[in-house]
Amino acid sequence: MLKYILRVLIFVVFISLSLYANEYKEIVNVKLKKDVHKKILVKYGKNEKLFKFRWTLYTDGGLVILRSYDRIVGQNILYDKLKSRSFRVELMTRGGSHYAVPYILVKFIEFDYKTDEAIFQLFLSDTHSKVRLEYLKQEN
């Protein structure tokens, strides 16, 4: 009887973990050279907003990122070996029916010394499928 209960419990745990393991709707890999903008058009409802970022300096394992979303600019320093490898951009304002707001997580993976490119992963979290992303052509 105890073995049966244990099997059922393990089964329930694995099923629940698999349901909640992937909160990201979309994962995209991006390679960028210095000062090349990555532009993403964010669409929801009747709104269209532009998210763009680029890197300007890589030294001592730190990558300086300049970013903007909906005319709000920011700067981050991401490190390839430490915990501060990513930044998050909320795509909608909180409030009302937007309790779990969609966001993009930009994670610095590594720097490719052969091609002088920074490698990123972009994660879209959108539990209610309200947002569409359109990846625009990269430009200097």
Image (tube, helix red, strand yellow):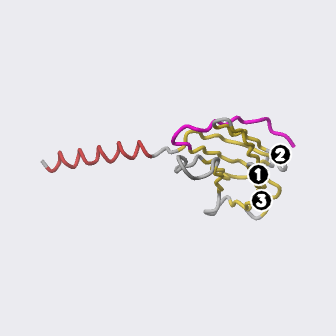
Element at badge 3? strand
**Which disc, if any, is residue 64?**
3
Look at mark 2 in the image and give the residue it sits on. Answer: 36
* Pick the front one: 60 or 101: 101
Query: Alpha-carbon distance for marks 1 and 3?
Result: 14 Å
Q: Is residue 5 left or right of residue 49?
A: left
Give the CA separation, mark 3 to mark 2.
13 Å
Instruction: Count residues near mark 1 (Cα–Cα under 10 Å), then give few for <14, some for 14-19, many for 20+.
Output: some
Using the image as rendered, state which of residue 79 and residue 23 is in the foreground. Answer: 23
Q: Is residue 135 left or right of residue 123?
A: right
Query: Which secondary structure lies at badge 2?
Result: loop
Foreground mark, 1 or 2, reads 1
**Which mark is first along the chain, 2 or 3?**
2
Percent from the top left, x then y, of residue 69? Answer: 73, 49
Location of residue 93 in the rendering, given as x and y in whole percent from the top left corner: 62, 51
Q: Amino acid at mark 3?
A: Val
User: Is 24 positioned to the left or the right of 110 in the image?
Assistant: left
Q: Residue at x 83, y 45 (%)?
A: 36
Residue interval drawn in magenta: 126-140
Q: Is residue 138 magenta-colored?
A: yes
What residue is shown at x 63% (from left), y 36% (from top)?
45
Q: Which mark is residue 44?
A: none
Image coordinates of residue 133 in percent, x first then y, are: 66, 37
**Badge 1 amino acid:** Ser
In the image, farthest residue toward the right = 140
Which image quarter: residue 131? Answer: top right
Q: Report the residue marked by disc 1.
A: 68
In the picture as drawn, the residue positioned furthest to the left comes out as 1
